Amino acid sequence: MLDNFSLERLVLITPPILLALTVHEFAHAWSAYKLGDPTAKNEGRLTLNPLHHMDPIGTFAIFITAMVGFGIGWARPVPVNPYNFKHMDRDDLLVSIAGPASNMLQAIVMGVAVRVCLWLGLAVNSPLVMMLFAGLTINLALAIFNMLPIFPLDGSHILRALVPSRYKIMLDESRRYAPLLLLFLIFTPILGYIISPFIFRFSVLFLGSDQLFRSLAYYFYQM
């Protein structure tokens, strides 16, 4: 891991990481508030101040994983009380989708911005292009990771909202094993095998070229 350390890369990934995590949690808080649950607002989470959302371990994890590959980590979960919603399952589903959707939107913006920068004549390995590329892959990694149907990730709430009522209790009981499963995936190559193809496909879609993605990745990890 130390062999892959680069102070320049660390500086470049810091803004997109903080933005990705902050907007993700803000999206949860804002959508919950709009759907009738003021819990996050009352706890000061309806803000774009990163200091209100960062989790020490999760933030450290995303910095380390972004340095050596794609960024996987987490912020402090936004508190949500689904009993404040008018339509509990539907609104909980919408709140859960809001976080990953915000990361996908950021990824689209970053991918388009890379293409605009190159069209304007910036070098492929220029700091701005490298920062935007990091933002693209980090946001895609966060979006896909959070969609896994494992508690407490957003995907588990989405799955629970969609399944018939008779399966909800079974899902709730399986939560006791979820942390172990999540740790197993994070600390083994399995997670990379699961999400890497999605990161590549969506990156190519937003960048418009697989060759451009490979060139950007090459220069980013040569820094």
Image: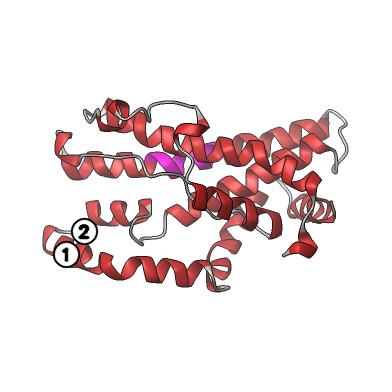
Residue 7 vertical position relative to residue 83 in the rendered view, above or below: below
Residue at the front extreme of this rendering:
56
User: Which residue is the site of mark 1?
Assistant: 167
Look at the image and tell me whether residue 165 can be seen: yes
Q: Residue furthest left?
A: 166
In this image, 62 relative to 48: left or right? right
Magenta-drawn stretch contains 99: yes
Position in image of residue 59 (x %, y %):
54, 48
Residue 38 image offset from top left, x and y in percent: 25, 28
Question: Which residue lies under the disc numbered 2?
Answer: 163
Pick whichever, 111 or 191, lies toward us: 191
Q: Is residue 9 above or below residue 87?
A: below
Magenta highlight range:
98-106
Quick check: is 49 in the magenta stretch?
no
Residue 163 in percent (x, y) is at 21, 58
Identify the residue at image location x=76%, y=47%: 9
Q: Main secondary structure of the magenta part?
A: helix
Give x and y (percent) for residue 133.
71, 44
Tell whether label 1 touches label 2 (CB within 8 Å). yes
